[in-house]
Image (cartoon, coloured by chain):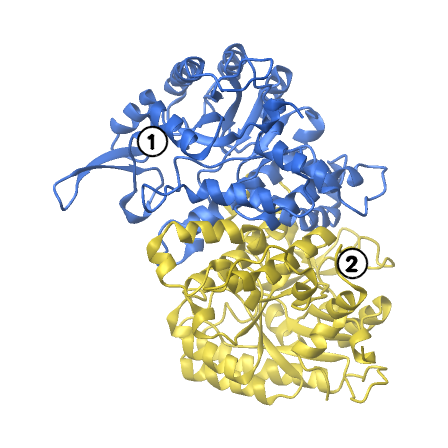
Chain colours: A blue, B yellow
Amino acid sequence: MTMASRLLVDVHTHVYLPRYASLLRSRSTVPFIRTNTTADGLSEDRLLILENEPSGGRPVGPQYWDREEKLKFMDKHGIDISVVSTANPWLDFLPAAQAQTLASELNEDLEQYCATSPSTNSSGPYKIKRLYGFGLLPLVPEVSTTSVLRIVNQIASLPHLRGLIMGTRGIGQGLDDEALDPVWAAIEKAGLVVFLHPHYGVDGSAWGDKDNGHVLPLALGFPFETTTSATRLILSGVFDRFPNLRLLLAHSGGALAALSSRLASCIDHDPRAASRLKHDARYYLGKLYLDAVAYGPEELGFVSDVISRSTGYEAGTSISKTPDRSLGSQRMFFGTDHPFFPPLEPSEKWKSVTENLEAIALVQGWSEEDKAGVRGGNAMSLFNLRE
Amino acid sequence: MTMASRLLVDVHTHVYLPRYASLLRSRSTVPFIRTNTTADGLSEDRLLILENEPSGGRPVGPQYWDREEKLKFMDKHGIDISVVSTANPWLDFLPAAQAQTLASELNEDLEQYCATSPSTNSSGPYKIKRLYGFGLLPLVPEVSTTSVLRIVNQIASLPHLRGLIMGTRGIGQGLDDEALDPVWAAIEKAGLVVFLHPHYGVDGSAWGDKDNGHVLPLALGFPFETTTSATRLILSGVFDRFPNLRLLLAHSGGALAALSSRLASCIDHDPRAASRLKHDARYYLGKLYLDAVAYGPEELGFVSDVISRSTGYEAGTSISKTPDRSLGSQRMFFGTDHPFFPPLEPSEKWKSVTENLEAIALVQGWSEEDKAGVRGGNAMSLFNLRE
């Protein structure tokens, strides 16, 4: 194992770049940042990104936009490298022309943010920066395919951007929209990693009338949305048409692994849906990459089982009886969700870091090498992290 | 191990009793049964239970109401005993007075359906019937608590009903409604098992415009609904107030196990939600019973891990590092979802049976005794299946 693979790499870590934060400050409807005066006469910024945001929005500060704060957070927790992405809701709320301009500008901004970052202390043969990035596409209704493809090419040309982050709405009809096929083709060809991330959850009527703060939309709504979007992608045949597409799902894919055999069974009972796919639904989970942001070792172990069993579901093969967790671990990646989920006391280490690291350390059936892979080695390979 | 624990017991198997089927035939809005004439001039019954039912509803026939068909299905698949429940949407759509009358009548009907069923071939010390049942409560808006409690007592008094099936709407505000506390108290005191089952899924806009038949609402919507309802129950403190309540979740609890550490983390970051609970969210999963209707061995093994780890999350204990799958298996129960998911060819064995049995057989880390427990022994104990 090389030195590089001992690095700790965070693939799920967000930023509102200063240009984006300014946009949010200029707005008065969701999404926006509002400056309140607290009961003590202090000024306080609040971020409102959801309709009917509970608790008057969440407090935001420099950790959302200041690169020094990102690096301090990384230093505090021993994170060597972060692959940074703009936080939701990206450009989803903008008219096409503005989304296109801003995507281009924010991609340049993020390239600068990464390119001018310090190098790691790695003593390996390659220079490695501490910050790399996921770019943004102007995926909004009425955008032209040409202009989306232009931005895919821009991202591919920016040396420190190694992928792009994407919500679940596509150009208005979701990601199972055939109109996106040229976009998937271009992304596949460029070898960029698509980081699929939720924002909208599900219709809020599911949560009932009790005030549970952000718990239900974050704990359940986010994973439900990711699960739905990935399932619709599977059903649409995207992974049959673009077998080399590299899709990284947030929050360990939400509930996709847990519901994948049920999904396979439901498809199996629907001849029309089944006829559209080359393989059992479970096969496609082995094509995915999943972050390890699930907060528990049993969850991570299970997800790695589900990834590894996928090969047994390739058409014409017999089903593997003993999933190989080691194999599955190679498609999993440490993440923190920073700067969301801050600690209740500012001096504390962030539980979102310590719990996810502890979860990786405690997975039964992962070797030390597997764990080092999930902590960083797998990301070094997937994103080709070197200058 | 006694003979009895080698029996195969199906805890997730539905019926529309003739009285209920008649009601559905008398209606012309959802839910209802409609008789169509096919292109060949044949008469065909279709069941419509969801608003915007895809594919013009699903074909229904005697397997939904005829007890002989249930027994034939059981014989074909070696199922010794079924604990039968009315299928969704139960009485949810009825005015309170009608729901109350019908609950009482249907409970009597189901008692007869079971009481007059044949006995098993078991050579053990007790006589055991082949059919037991879950009763129904009139849980609809504007019902009086008194009348719900009267039906709880009725169910407790009917010797072949060993629990009750419940949807997620309660009396209109969901199951986290404090108005239900007297109902939980009465159910707990009577020792009845509550079988929590989905019907509504989530808002259909999540599924997009593509025609994927029933796949998305069944594969994802159902488990999302169960997950949401169980999570709201946890957040409401029901399991702290009624620690002996016996709640059986359909479809292995949906995505609850997979999202339980994320849920715990989200609660942990919300001091108000956390302050309402005695334990980490993961503790409460060990209070639950889960059917084994998840269609895959990895899913079942994972769920049993999550059940068994719960004790490590009791306030004041240190977290267990190695979940004991055997322990977790004791709260899991074979089920088939009959008569839903029929085979595409009538002569075939039902995959919903064979796949769920195969899944049980293949769980890594379950002993033969554990597997026998999941197949039937656990149900024999939980429902005290003897005359």
For mark 1, give the secondary structure. Answer: helix
Count residues near mark 1 (Cα–Cα under 10 Å), then give few for <14, some for 14-19, many for 20+. many
- Pointer 2 indicates a residue of which chain? B
Location of residue A19 by image quarter: top left
Please identify the residue farthest to the top as the structure is shown.
Answer: A157
User: Of A270 and A249, which appears nearest the observer?
Assistant: A249
- Left or right of B357 on screen, residue B273: left
Q: Nearer the viewer, residue B43 or B202?
A: B202
What's the residue at 52%, 87% (across, down)?
B153
Residue B19, x across and y down, in percent: 63, 77
Residue B80 coordinates in the image, percent (x, y): 80, 75
Tell how many labels: 2
Q: Position of residue A208 (x, y in %)?
A: 40, 58
Among the 4 quarters of the image, the one containing residue A1: top right
Identified at 86% across, 57% down, the residue is B348
Considering depth in this image, is B302 or B65 the residue closer to the camera? B302
Labels 2 and 1 in the same subunit: no
Does B118 appear above or below B212?
below
